[in-house]
Image (tube, grey):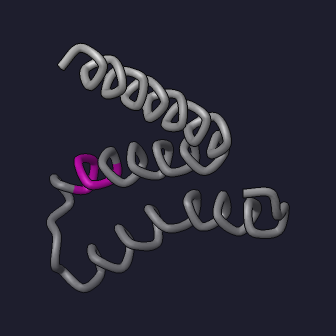
């Protein structure tokens, strides 16, 4: 993501969302306090993964392009041999 404003909004949302969701769910009574840590860990891990993917999007696309090129070469090699 090249747009700095969007990146800042995404980072802010990733930092604010977990505590806000947990506070709301606890107040409503839909989750008990014992499961808060588990949910926070899951949300935090997913937000880190999303942030990493978005931050390094060009690297991910280059990696996928490289694997696609490897598959094309492999397929061409199989067709030549058959």
Which is the main secondary structure of the residues drawn in magenta? helix
Verify whether residue 33 appears in magenta.
no
Numbered range of the magenta stretch: 36-40
Q: Front-most of 53 and 78?
A: 78
- Which residue is rendered at x = 39% and y = 49% of the image? 46
User: In this rendering, would 64 be left or right of 27?
Assistant: right
User: In this rendering, would 17 be left or right of 29?
Assistant: right
Q: Return the x and y of residue 64 as percentages of the image width and height.
A: 49, 36
Q: Front-most of 11 and 75?
A: 75
- Which residue is rendered at x = 42% and y = 23% of the image? 73
Q: Quadrant of residue 2?
A: bottom right
Q: Quadrant of the N terminus?
A: bottom right
| Position of 61 relative to 25 (above/below) | above
- Which residue is rendered at x = 62% and y = 45% of the image? 57
User: In this rendering, would 11 be left or right of 6?
Assistant: left
| Position of 40 relative to 74 (above/below) | below
| Position of 26 relative to 65 (above/below) | below
């Amino acid at each position: 993501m090249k747009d700095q404003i969007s990146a800042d909004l995404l980072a802010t949302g990733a930092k604010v969302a977990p505590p806000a969701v947990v506070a709301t769910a606890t107040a409503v009574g839909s989750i008990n306090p014992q499961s808060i840590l588990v949910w926070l860990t899951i949300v935090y891990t997913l937000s880190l993964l999303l942030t990493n993917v978005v931050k390094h999007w060009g690297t991910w696309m280059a990696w996928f392009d490289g694997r696609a090129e490897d598959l094309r070469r492999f397929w061409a090699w199989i067709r030549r041999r058959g």
